[in-house]
Image (spheres, rainbow, N blue to C red):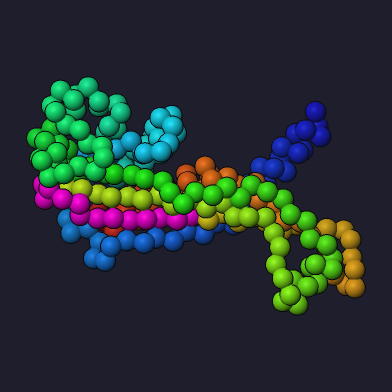
Amino acid sequence: MKKAAANLLCCLVLLSSCIGSTRHAAIPGGCPQALQANDRILVGVIPGLLAHRSHQLYQQLEQEFGQKGISTAYVAEQEYDLARQGIKPNPAPDSITLVQMRKAGYTYYLELAVGDVASGMGYARTSAQEQKEIQQGYGTIGADDSKATVHFKLHSTDQKKQVYTLATTTKLSGVTLAGNKHEDGYRNSSTVNLSTASLATDKALKKGVAELLKNCKVSQ
């Protein structure tokens, strides 16, 4: 039991130690119209994901927007009311649909997509000789990275068009652990990456929402 607990603790430590990097790509100029604390945003279902996973990501987004006083609604949860008003928000809405959303009380429609997803969960061992070659510039070795990109497209129901796009990519790299074998003064090592594409997606969504809110200059 103690050994299992120790192994679990080790895995958690390694997982939390994964090295993360995030980059954003957005249209120049930011949002032409600042978001307001009383805005109501309709969020679309993420295509290509299971319903549970899409809803899980929406809940994370809902929490981030809620901290800024902005309310959100999820298409899948508003399906009956939207259908009753003749609104079909997926795929990307046209100007007529955006007008209908405006009448329904939504100031924006947020279209989401997850792409470029790769899972790097793995383990790689490097011998002392290979470590020597790496340090001398003869090669590289290691566990693959976990990477995911979340795309945001913000549509204004007032302007009846898309007003902002953002793509946020997060990459999680493994950590290198020193071994106990030496050769010619070089120690062997192991590179471990316990992160997953799912974790990378979660982080990309969180950081992407923060970037969107910052660029759109939320008014309190």
Q: Main secondary structure of the magenta part?
A: strand
Along the line of sight, the residue nearer the viewer: 55 or 65: 55
Decide if residue 171 is in sight here: yes
Number of numbered markers:
0
Image coords of residue 54 (percent x, y): 40, 35
161 in the magenta segment: yes
Q: Is 11 rendered above or below residue 31?
A: above
Decide if residue 17 is in sight here: no
210 in the magenta segment: no
Quadrant of res 73: top left
Along the line of sight, the residue nearer the viewer: 166 or 68: 166
Residue at the location (36% across, 39% down)? Answer: 46
Image coords of residue 93 (percent x, y): 20, 42
Image coords of residue 205 (percent x, y): 41, 47
Q: Is residue 46 left or right of residue 102?
A: right
Residue at the location (81% across, 32% down)? Answer: 2
Image quadrant for the N terminus? Answer: top right
Q: Which residues are magenta?
A: 158-170
Quadrant of res 141: bottom right
Residue at the location (76% across, 39% down)? Answer: 7
